[in-house]
Image: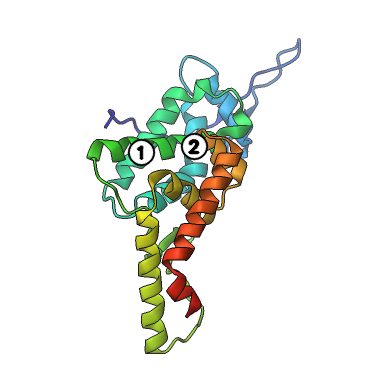
Amino acid sequence: MSQSISLSWSTGEVTLPQLGEVTPPQVSVQPDKLSNYDLILRCQDGLSPDRTAFAELLRRYQSHVDKILYHLAPDWQDRADLAQEVWIRVYRNIKRLNEPVKFRGWLSRIATNLFYDELRKRKRVANPLSLDAPRRLDDGEMDWEIASETPNPEEDMTTREFYEQLREAISDLPEVFRTTIVLREIEGMAYEEIAEITGVSLGTVKSRIARARSRLQSQLQTYLEA
């Protein structure tokens, strides 16, 4: 893992450039009042990214990075380290981002690529998703909901068995199919976003998702009929 950098930068004031022939009083704006676009431009200006602007970007998008890594590697104990490595890569490469409006997709691609870099290093296949585990949201944690609010013991056992089979079926998918189905069905990303992140054509993304769905449906047909 790369050497770490501090991610607990204070969110001090950012001084805006002064315009006009007459020098006006210094104008300052809190980073949380700036748009994402302006924050990125500030990070791209100068020899190194503006730390207060970068800290605000981190605050806004940290949960997004955590969610991607959680769904791709729920059983990895070092997800926090991976998340920090994502932001280190962002800090080092943000000047190369040509279209600031695409920051979210670019960030998702960095997180996904880092996951597969680590996966190849470990030479093992990690379970990408645990559908019966708590899912972390912005306001805390919640368990995956089941169809009935008050299931009887038999229904509860059947539901748990179904989700276990679904988890195993997703784990058994080829790596490229697993990535696309997680980004589409769990992350809720558009096909265009997935194409950008995975570096393949829109048609390939649609084909992979269709094949992944077909394979899951085939493996879980008994449960779906029940």
Q: What residue sits 63% from the left and 36% below the top? A: 35
Dot 2 crowding, Cα within 10 Å, few <14, some 14–19, many 20+: some
The picture places residue 111, in percent across and down from the top left corner, at 42, 39
Residue 168: which quarter of the image?
bottom left
Q: Confirm or deny contact between disc 1 and disc 2 (CB under 8 A).
A: no
Query: In the rendered image, is residue 102 in sight?
Result: yes
- Taking 166 as reference, is 3 left or right? left
Residue ranking furthest to the front: 218
Camera-side residue of 35 and 112: 112
Spatial CA span between label 1 and label 2: 11 Å
Element at badge 1? helix
Q: Amino acid at mark 2?
A: Thr
Residue corresponding to mark 1 = 116
Q: Residue 215: percent from the left, percent from the top?
A: 46, 58
Q: Position of residue 225 (x, y in %)?
A: 49, 77
| SS type, badge 2 | helix
| Amino acid type, residue under disc 1 in the picture | Tyr
